[in-house]
Amino acid sequence: MLQTKLSLAALLIGASLLSACGDSTTNIVEKDPIPIEDDHDHDHDDVSAAGRLVISAKDSNLLSVYELSDGSLLDSFAVADIPSALAASAAHRYALAIQRTTDRVEFIDGGLYQEDHVDHLHDYQQDPELVSFVLSNSRPTHITASDSQLAVFFDGDAASGAPASVAVISDADITTDSNGYPVLNYSLHMHGAAQARGEYLISTVRDANSATTLPDKVAVYEQHGDHYHQELVFDELCPGLHGSAQNEHFISFGCTDGVLLIEQEGTTFTASKLANTADITGTMRIGTLVGAMQAEHFVGFAGTSVFAIHAHDGEMQLIDWQATAGATLTGYGFADKGSKFVLLDSLGYLTILNYHGHEHEGTDEAAFEFAAKVQLTTADVTAMPQGSRFELAISASDDKVYVINPIDRTLLTVDTADAEVVATKQLNFMPHKLVWLGIAEPAEAHNH
Amino acid sequence: MGNKMFKKTILACLVAGSLLSGQVSAESISGVVTDSAGKPVAGAKVTVVGENQHAITDEAGRFSVGQLLMQDAELHIEASRYAHRNFHFTVPQQGLSDVSLVLLSSTIEVIDVKASPFHASATESAIPVSVLAGDALKMRQAGTLGDTLKNEVGVHSNFYGGVASSPIIRGLDGPRVLITQNGLDAGDASRVGPDHSVAAEASTATQIEVLRGPATLFYGSGAIGGVVNVVDERIPTDNSTRAEWMLQRESVNNEKLAAGSLVTGVDNIGLYVDGFWRDSDDYRIPGFAEAQPDDDAVKGRVASSAATAKGFTLGGSYLLDNGYVGVSYGRLEREYGIPGHSHGGHEEEGDDHAAEEQVYADLTQNRYQLLSELNFSSGLIRTVNTRLAFTDYEHSEIEGGAVGTTFKNRSQEARLELLHRPYQDWRGGLSLHYKFSDFEAVGEEAFTPPSETQMLALGWMEERHFGPWLVQVGARVERVTIDATDVLLPDIGAHSHDGDDHGHDHDHGAEFIRVFDVSQRFTPYSVSAGTVWDFTEGYNLGLSVSRSQRAPAASELLSFGAHIGTASYEVGALFVLDDDEFVLNTQPIEMEVANNLDITLRKFSGNTGFVLNAFYNRIDNYYYQQNTGLFAESGHNHGGHDHGDDDHGHSHDAELPVYLFTTADVTLHGLEAQFSWQINDPFKLTLQGDYIRARIKGGGDLPRTPPLRFAAELAYELDALSADVRATRYFKQDKVSELEQATAGYTLLDASVSYRFDLGPQQLTAYIKGQNLTDEEARVHTSFLKDLTPLPGRSVAVGIRGSF
């Protein structure tokens, strides 16, 4: 019965098909045209003010460079190995792809830079490229920057017996592929930190008999051509030293018992210890420090407790950033040209603090004042892929902060002045780390 | 088929059988299978045609099948090294016993094709077919379908750096060769670009069938050049427990392969599971990858040719007395490099860290199938075959960590075959066939706009024996609709590179992209008639004439964009060139029409055998890509030329030649020959060759036409040991199209040794095989990457496989 019906259906279809056998028709309706979005719109004389981002892909050696003015992918580069971290060069022209376990740092030229033409600064915009300059030494780990110099601390390796070293480079060294930059060579390995101060380098010292890889002293080194001479070892101890920062007059190091502060006056360096306050209890300690040239305060981190450290006044004050229970910090830094401090946490919030320490000196007003908390995602943060976390990059040229959300592979642009997410870009890969490159203070327009 | 010619012998046997019959069982047949010398044939498979049962002969050649549904029973006997035979019986109530069935030895390996509703094999078909199965398949399986089949007569590989090679049948590929899995469209994107891998796996297949020449009668438009059908047991038709597995390691690309499948079941339930994993690195080559290497090129490997693939299949079926119905789910994941994808660009001179361009594709496919065969003992309908498939395919091409383009193909297919009970000795039936494909490409390389293609077809096929003549006729009519709501016609600023006007400006900004809603409807038909004439015992002559129409594929009509896989800017036939500017084609879109003649002469019994085949195809309105001589920007965010700085002298790095799909009348003709000689018990010599000529009417040749090829293979097989050595000569191809270069000839030497042994209930085979033993640098004329990726260098694979 069923089969008869099927055959009938088949015959009917067959008849209808046969009626137009060998035939073909085409029906075309023109629709409204699409105006071409001119993707050639950056006037070549205009240099991107928004800057560029370098984003690494997770478990990959690929780095993608995005133009922030239009969100376009400019190019991608493969470095030798999977970068463990990204950092920016002193002038934000180059991105460092730090490949810790394979003892290498490679550099990507973001293509945005400034040249000093004596009577004026001139901005340049080029295509990004992977440059020839490379640093190869054992276990590059902490990178610290001043306005003009970058100190790359190579920890060395107990297993291979490789000693620690510090390379101090400028953007010009990278541009010219120079090997004349100074290097401080240690005889021991250590998980140390260094801060470049022009001719001087303030760097850590570890006791050869120490059971830990953490140093406990700090020394001043002076550059002699391509190497450094030790000038002075401070008596002040800094047990379990970890974390360092600098501002205009001070260099700070985190210790288990407080913060070691080194003050520079000309060529004179003096050390003092700011002891932990009662807010630091149990095993808490300041292990991370953030500073900015123009900021009088350092920001110290002991877990999720954040402290405003005024080196000159010798004060350490807990900052109330209205932490949510269970949140851990995954990113932080001064933003909006130093007028704000941002904290990115594991629950997907960006906390914005207004910083007026450098403006309201001597007033009672807290240096860091809670301004806003921006919820970056409504996604379930427990869906965060293993080994990933929210990461941020902070623009040096404007008030934007860029956050990657590995849960949905997006790049978010946060306007810290308006405290809102102003753009979301879908990435086609799993982002891992990112860094901002560009020109912090674009030159005034001028004619040649 | 050749049923009729054996009738006399069988009748004799039958009479003897029934006279001698002692005890008999109701409606059963038992007996013995012997060779022509009366020696019993063990291990022969005796299948009751039209019923879901078979038996395997024992050491004494004995078999028994019972509970027959029909009085007029037909047994199909197949055994290794013998020609297949069909035997007809009229079974009395008390059954038949002690029938004697005689098989004729054959040097031609004969395996039945499952892709055709008619019974067909290499020796019994009006159109030429070949089947790769068993140990031969296991030895030749490769990471791609093209490389697996490249040694089959009439089949070449379009070698795409060993990662996406797909088979070329008689010089045709792409939208003209259909790839199917168990008779249902593979549902991938492999017909659209040579860099798109075929979503089928050879290591878990039980056989791979090739129908050479038009098979539009069964499969429709897409099969105008032939069909490759990958068969596995994902929907088991019985549930006797058996398993197969293999492990292999290959030296040239460090490929590691593990694959296995298991069929089992209880009661009326059959269950199937398979899985495979293969992982390879970039493969080694004797010289440079590029035919004209750069100064800083590195010898020895082809970059971006590594691949990783894994997949599994689960299936289950309900076994009935009169057939089966089953469903399966399969998942395939592949990640493969796309070699030859260079952009020039940012590597600086003397830069040690020149970034390797990492370009790869990431493919995922989910495939659901339902297969059923039901046989009925009474009524008009003898058999109902049902096949349903749903596939969800996606692959992304990833460059520098970012997805460049994503291709998606969601397809549904249904095929219903209604085979009627023989009427006046005519056997055959109707086939209803529906296929729907929702194809989408998103991203930089989205050269084809999203489109939906629908096909509904009705086919009719009949066959009948007239004495020694088997006559097969068929016709099919289909309706193909292609709907694309957003066909784009951008102004691409195509320009010629003649002269020195490098100062061309691309004139962006002011223009609009025109958008069209296009719907096409085609009603192609196919008619075919064929015969197999058993003109004397052990020989036959096959003759097939057909006329087929093909509706052009969406990609051939609607494309407009850069296609990195072919390194060209592709423009579909919906557009025409008007003075360096593309405009809408106002001429009607024609269907391709092929008229084909195929003649096959076979000798299939005795110590020697051969299959000789000649074909002539005249194809009108053949769609092909014509080089316009223009260049267009790839639109590919790469060279970064749009941020041009004075110090970056970007020339035409990011520009691609523009190819326009256009039609011409072409003629393809050629010869295929296979000869095999069982020299003595262990030694067998096989010679084969193929030749094709593909000409455009009015002068010129089609591009990438396979060269003349000869192969000789000497095989040894005795007891536990088998070995073979094979030399294949590919001759120079200098019949080239405009702007195509001739390709030098080369010889490949392959060899293998296998040793079989038992371990408990398992039969194991350990083997070593070598390919390209002379480490010849070979460039494949049929490859889009001829000048970028030569064939792999010398390779040795060791492996072990087992079954129980």
Image (cartoon, rainbow, N blue to C red):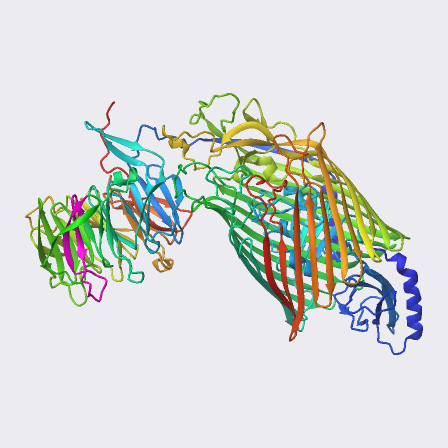
Q: Position of residue A409 (x, y in %)?
A: 39, 50
Q: Position of residue B27 (x, y in %)?
A: 84, 72
Name the one closer to the observer, B804 or B280: B280
Instruction: Judge whether residue B739 is colored magenta.
Output: no
Name the one closer to the observer, B108 or B300: B300
Number of marks drawn: 0
* Residue in the picture at 76% in, 50% down: B687
The answer to whether residue A355 is above or below residue B383 is above
Side (left or right) of B447 relative to A339: right
Q: Quadrant of the N terminus of chain A?
A: bottom right
Residue B706 position by quadrant: top right
* Residue in the picture at 18% in, 51% down: A245
The magenta segment is A196-224
Instruction: Judge whether residue A218 is colored magenta.
Output: yes
- Residue farthest bottom in this picture: B23
Name the one closer to the observer, A7 or B617: B617
Side (left or right) of B537 relative to A182: right
Q: Position of residue A159 (x, y in %)?
A: 31, 62
Q: Position of residue A238 (x, y in %)?
A: 14, 60
Q: Quadrant of the C terminus of chain A?
A: top left
- Residue B669, visible in the rendered structure: yes
Side (left or right) of B548 relative to B388: right
- Residue A319, visible in the rendered structure: no
Name the one closer to the observer, A438 or B488: A438
